[in-house]
Image (spheres, rainbow, N blue to C red):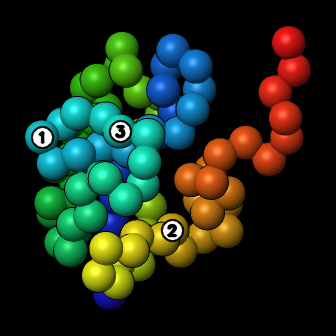
Amino acid sequence: MTRLIVTGAATVDGRPIYMRRDGSWVDQLSKAAAVDQQDECDALLARARSDEGTVCDPYAIRVTVEGESVRAVSFREVIRAGGPTVAATV
């Protein structure tokens, strides 16, 4: 089943974060609020846009949900959810 999740970049370090139903943020796609209805997503997105101190440029993405498994539909979001594709340097 395809659902919607609100995501953006954490203002503190740029990592991908995902919104929970209560308006808090998590760094795991599987712990985000996956909603069925566009109006639910719009409400979460409006809340996210007002949280400028935590998230930068929030937007909605499509995900598939099968049981406990949540996976982003677009390849870009699969990469974002999986973490950095290069090693960090000091």
Any mark on residue 72, and which? 2
The residue positioned 24% from the left and 56% from the top of the image is: 33
Q: Which residue is mark 3?
A: 26
Of badges 3 and 2, nearer the viewer stands 3
Which element carries disc 1, helix, strand or loop? Answer: loop
Tell me if label 1 and label 3 are in contact, CB under 8 Å. no
Residue matched to label 1: 22
**Percent position (x, y) of residue 10?**
48, 26
Q: Position of residue 20 (x, y in %)?
A: 23, 46
- How far apart are labels 1 and 2 at the CA level? 21 Å
Mark 1 vs 2, N-terminal side: 1
Asked if residue 53 is positioned above or below residue 32 in the image, the reply reads above
Residue 60 seen in render: no
**Mark 1 and mark 3: Cα distance apart in space:** 11 Å
Does residue 54 appear to the left or right of 38 in the view shown? right
Is tag 3's residue or tag 2's residue first in the polypeptide sequence?
3
**Where's residue 38, x and y in %?**
22, 67
Do the CB atoms of the residues marked 1 and 2 lie less than 8 Å apart?
no
Comparing 59 with 30, the one in front is: 30
Q: Residue at x 80, y 47 (%)?
A: 85
Disc 3 on helix, strand or loop? strand
Q: Is residue 1 above or below residue 78?
A: below
For mark 2, give the secondary structure: strand
Question: What residue appears at the point 35 percent right and 78 percent down from the top-left corner?
Answer: 65
